[in-house]
């Protein structure tokens, strides 16, 4: 099934920043598109537009479906996923983080907690260049961007 949408309603407040991480995981790991709406009215508008789009497509295309049992079979995970695999996909959500760079970072920091450990020991100014110092091939700009996320997460 393609074009799966995960609808999130409301504004994110700082003490629930971990929800952003859960959304990133849902997007990267499960392949959902994330749609954020500020209010029930925005959600209603979004759902109305999706409904209108689907109605239009039903009229112009022949649609086929599958049984729920078939859907369940196709949805089963076919391989064991390791923390490092998920971590690499999470890293790739960050702008400027290519697959190769994410693999290099994951070889030095095999999990999010290991990266958090690095940032927890540093002052904000030191944190900006920490990743580029610890991992060859990571630019100072990307290092500074990553430090913003990890430093903000640690402050909460």
Image: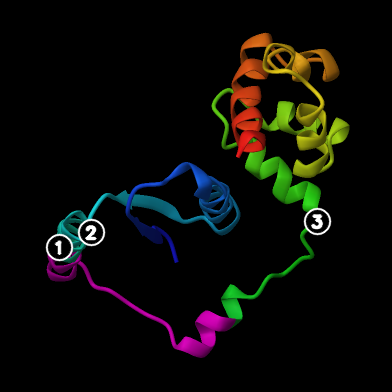
Disc 1 target residue: 48
Number of the label disc, if any, that sits on residue 82? 3
Q: Please tell me which residue is depicted at 73% across the width and 28% down the height of the picture.
A: 100
Q: How is the image coloured?
A: rainbow
Q: Are marks 3 and 1 in contact (CB under 8 Å)?
A: no
Q: Please tell me which residue is depicted at 19% across the width and 54% down the height of the picture.
A: 42
Looking at the figure, which quarter contains the N terminus?
A: bottom left
Alpha carbon separation for disc pair 3 and 1: 39 Å
Helix, strand or loop at label 2? It is helix
Q: Please tell me which residue is depicted at 57% across the width and 31% down the height of the picture.
A: 94
Helix, strand or loop at label 3? It is loop
In this view, 93 is above or below 63: above
User: In terms of sequence position, does the residue under pointer 3 or pointer 2 come before the other?
Assistant: 2
Asked if residue 53 is among those painted magenta in the image, a careful observer would answer no
Of the residues tagged 3 and 2, which is closer to the observer? 2
Alpha carbon separation for disc pair 3 and 2: 35 Å
User: In terms of sequence position, does the residue under pointer 2 or pointer 1 come before the other?
Assistant: 2
Q: Position of residue 140 (x, y in %)?
A: 68, 10
Number of the label disc, if any, that sits on residue 43? 2
In this view, 34 is above or below 116: below
Looking at the figure, which quarter contains the C terminus?
A: top right
Give the side of residue 122 with respect to residue 155, left or right. right
What is the number of callouts on the image? 3
Q: Are marks 3 and 2 in contact (CB under 8 Å)?
A: no
Q: Please tell me which residue is depicted at 52% across the width and 47% down the height of the picture.
A: 15
Q: Quadrant of residue 127?
A: top right
Magenta region = 54-72
């Amino acid at each position: 099934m393609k074009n799966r949408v995960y609808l999130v309603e409301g504004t994110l407040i700082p003490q629930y920043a971990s929800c952003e991480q859960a959304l990133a995981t849902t997007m990267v790991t499960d392949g959902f598109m994330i749609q954020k709406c500020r209010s029930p009215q925005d959600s209603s508008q979004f759902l109305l537009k999706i409904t209108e789009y689907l109605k239009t497509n039903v009229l112009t295309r022949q649609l086929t479906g599958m049984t729920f049992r078939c859907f369940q079979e196709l949805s089963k995970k076919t391989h064991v996923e390791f923390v490092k695999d998920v971590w690499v996909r999470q890293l790739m959500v960050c702008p400027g983080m290519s697959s190769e760079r994410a693999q290099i970072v994951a070889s030095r920091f095999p999990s999010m907690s290991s990266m958090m450990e690095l940032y927890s020991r540093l002052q904000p100014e030191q944190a900006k260049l920490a990743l580029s110092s610890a991992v060859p091939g990571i630019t100072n700009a990307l290092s500074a961007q990553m430090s913003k996320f990890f430093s903000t997460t640690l402050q909460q």
